[in-house]
C-alpha cells in the first residue's frame, strides 16, 4: 500500500487528501451530531431522493467513488484514502443508504463481471448520484437455494424474454437497475444453466409490490416478470455462466453486510436498526447502572463489538494479501449477524418490560428496542442465511467435505421441486 497517489489532477498523500476533504466537507455538507445522526427511512422514496442529492454533491466536490477506477467515474485510490475520508465525514450527513446495495454489492459486482459498457454507464451513473442499483435474486419458492431459481429467460430472435418472480428485493422500489438471476438452460445441472441480467426497472413487463414486515416496515419488494424483453447487452458476464457472477455478488454482499467493503463511503449506521445499542446509557436510564448482572451483560456486548471491528480489519487485509480466500468475507457476515442479535437481545434484557410497553413519552425510547427486536434476525438472512454461511466457511475456507445433495449433477428439468 502506498501513501501517495498520482492522478491527472493532483498528487495527494493520505494526510493531504484527508485535509482537503476536511475543508470541503465543512463548506459543502450538512453537519450532524455523530452520536445522534439523522436516520434515513429506507422504505420512503424521499430518503433515496435525498441520498442521490448528497451523492451528487460528493461527486461535484471530487469525493465520490474513491476506490472505483477513474475510467468509471471514481478516483482510483486505494482503501487508505476511503478510510481517511470516512474518518473526516463522521460529523456530516452522508448518502449512507446508497452503500448497500448500490455501491458495495451491485456496482462492485459489475466492476468485476460486467461488460465495458456496463461499467462505464452504470457505475459512473451511480457515482454521479443519477442511478440506484438493486438486487433481484431470491424467489418465492427458492428459500436459501439461490441456484434453484425458476425465473426463466428464453432467447427469441435476438431478445431475451423473462417470465417469473423475485421477492425480498431490498429497496427495489427506489431502484433504476437490478441485477437479476434467471435460468437460461434447463437441461444442465442447476448451477450451469443460469445467466445474470442487468434489468431497467422501468421496463414494461415488470409489476412490483411492497412487502409489509412484522415491524411495519415496507422496505422489501416482490417483482413479477411477464414477458419482459431484454437485449443481448443486458447479460452480465456470459450466458449460462451466471453462477460465476452470482458467486462474486454474494462475496460482495457478505462483506457489505458485515461492514468490510472498500466501496462503502461513510462510517455511521445507515438506519436506526443498524445503530449499535447504547447499553451503558440504557442501564443508567433504567436505574441499573450499578447492577453487576447488567454491567456483565453490557460488557459482553461491548467486547463483542470491539472484536467485530478487529475481525473486519483482519479479514480485509488477509483477503488482500492472499492469506485468506475471497470467501473469507463470510466470516465477517456471520460474526456481524451473531453480534447484532446479541446486542439487541442484551438491550431488551436491560430494558425489560419498558422495551415492549409504550406508556408515553417517558418510555418511547425504550419501546423502540422492542420494535427493533422484531427485526433482529435480518442480519442472519442477508447474503444467504447464517446456516449457509457456516457451510461456506466449513467447505470453502476450512476444506471440510461438502454436504450431500440429491440434485448435484442432475439436469435441472429432472429435479423434483415442490413435491413431498
Image (spheres, helix red, strand yellow):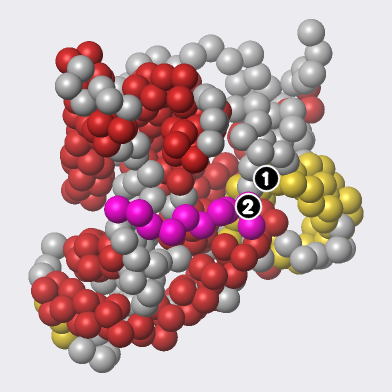
CB under 8 Å between discs 1 and 2: yes
Residue 49 percent coordinates (x, y): 59, 70
| SS label for mark 2 | loop
Residue 309 percent coordinates (x, y): 23, 41
| Residue at 28% over, 62% down | 90
| SS label for mark 1 | loop
Note whether 146 is above or below 17 in the view shown: above
Q: Residues within 10 Å of mark 1 (few under 14, many from 20)?
A: some
As for residue 293 lying within the magenta part, the answer is no
Residue 277 percent coordinates (x, y): 34, 37
Residue 144 percent coordinates (x, y): 60, 27
- Label 2, on which residue? 43
Residue 296, quarter of picture: top left
| Residue at 71% over, 39% down | 212
Note whether 298 is above or below 130 in the view shown: above
Depth check, front residue: 365 or 180: 365
Magenta-highlighted residues: 35-44
Name the main secondary structure of what is drawn in magenta.
Answer: loop
Note whether 232 is above or below 337 in the view shown: below
- Label 1, on which residue? 218
Depth check, front residue: 292 or 164: 292
Q: In this view, which residue lies farthest toward the bottom? A: 9
Q: Which mark is residue 174?
A: none
Question: Do we see residue 193 in this rendering?
Answer: no
Amino acid at each position: 500500500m502506498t501513501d501517495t497517489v498520482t492522478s491527472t489532477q493532483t498528487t495527494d498523500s493520505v494526510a493531504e487528501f484527508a485535509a482537503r476533504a476536511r475543508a470541503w466537507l465543512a463548506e459543502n455538507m450538512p453537519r450532524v451530531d455523530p452520536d445522534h445522526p439523522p436516520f434515513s427511512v429506507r422504505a420512503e422514496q424521499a430518503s433515496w431522493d435525498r441520498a442521490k442529492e448528497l451523492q451528487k454533491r460528493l461527486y461535484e466536490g471530487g469525493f465520490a467513488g474513491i476506490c472505483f477506477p477513474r475510467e468509471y467515474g471514481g478516483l482510483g485510490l486505494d482503501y487508505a484514502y476511503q478510510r481517511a475520508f470516512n474518518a473526516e465525514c463522521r460529523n456530516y450527513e452522508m448518502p449512507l443508504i446508497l452503500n448497500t446495495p448500490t455501491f458495495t454489492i451491485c456496482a462492485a459486482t459489475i466492476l468485476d463481471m460486467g461488460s465495458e459498457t456496463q461499467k462505464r454507464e452504470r457505475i459512473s451513473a451511480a457515482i454521479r448520484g443519477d442511478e440506484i442499483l438493486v438486487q433481484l435474486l431470491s424467489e418465492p419458492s427458492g428459500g436459501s437455494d439461490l441456484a434453484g431459481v425458476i425465473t426463466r429467460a428464453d432467447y427469441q430472435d435476438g431478445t431475451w424474454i423473462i417470465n417469473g418472480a423475485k421477492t425480498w428485493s431490498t429497496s427495489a422500489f427506489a431502484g433504476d437497475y437490478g441485477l437479476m438471476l434467471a435460468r437460461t438452460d434447463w437441461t444442465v445441472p442447476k448451477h450451469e444453466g443460469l445467466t445474470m441480467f442487468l434489468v431497467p426497472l422501468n421496463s414494461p413487463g415488470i409489476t412490483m409490490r411492497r412487502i409489509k414486515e412484522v415491524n411495519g416496515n415496507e422496505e422489501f419488494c416482490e417483482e413479477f416478470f411477464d414477458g419482459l424483453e431484454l437485449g443481448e447487452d443486458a447479460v452480465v458476464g456470459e450466458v449460462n455462466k451466471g453462477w460465476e457472477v452470482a458467486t462474486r455478488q454474494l462475496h460482495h454482499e457478505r462483506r457489505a453486510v458485515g461492514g468490510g467493503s472498500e466501496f462503502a463511503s461513510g462510517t455511521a449506521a445507515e438506519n436506526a436498526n443498524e445503530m449499535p445499542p447504547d447499553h451503558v446509557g440504557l442501564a443508567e436510564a433504567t436505574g441499573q447502572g450499578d447492577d453487576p448482572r447488567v454491567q456483565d451483560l453490557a460488557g459482553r456486548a461491548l467486547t463483542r463489538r470491539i472484536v467485530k471491528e478487529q475481525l473486519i480489519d483482519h479479514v480485509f487485509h488477509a483477503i488482500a494479501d492472499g492469506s485468506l480466500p475471497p470467501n473469507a468475507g463470510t466470516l465477517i457476515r456471520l460474526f456481524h449477524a451473531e453480534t447484532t442479535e446479541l446486542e439487541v437481545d442484551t438491550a431488551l434484557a436491560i430494558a425489560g418490560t419498558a422495551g415492549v410497553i409504550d406508556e408515553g413519552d417517558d418510555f418511547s425510547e425504550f419501546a423502540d428496542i422492542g420494535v427493533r427486536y422484531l427485526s433482529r434476525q435480518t442480519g442472519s438472512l442477508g447474503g444467504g442465511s447464517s446456516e449457509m454461511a457456516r457451510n461456506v466457511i466449513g467447505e470453502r475456507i476450512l476444506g471440510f467435505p461438502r454436504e450431500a445433495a440429491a440434485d448435484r449433477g442432475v439436469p435441472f428439468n429432472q429435479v423434483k421441486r415442490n413435491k413431498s
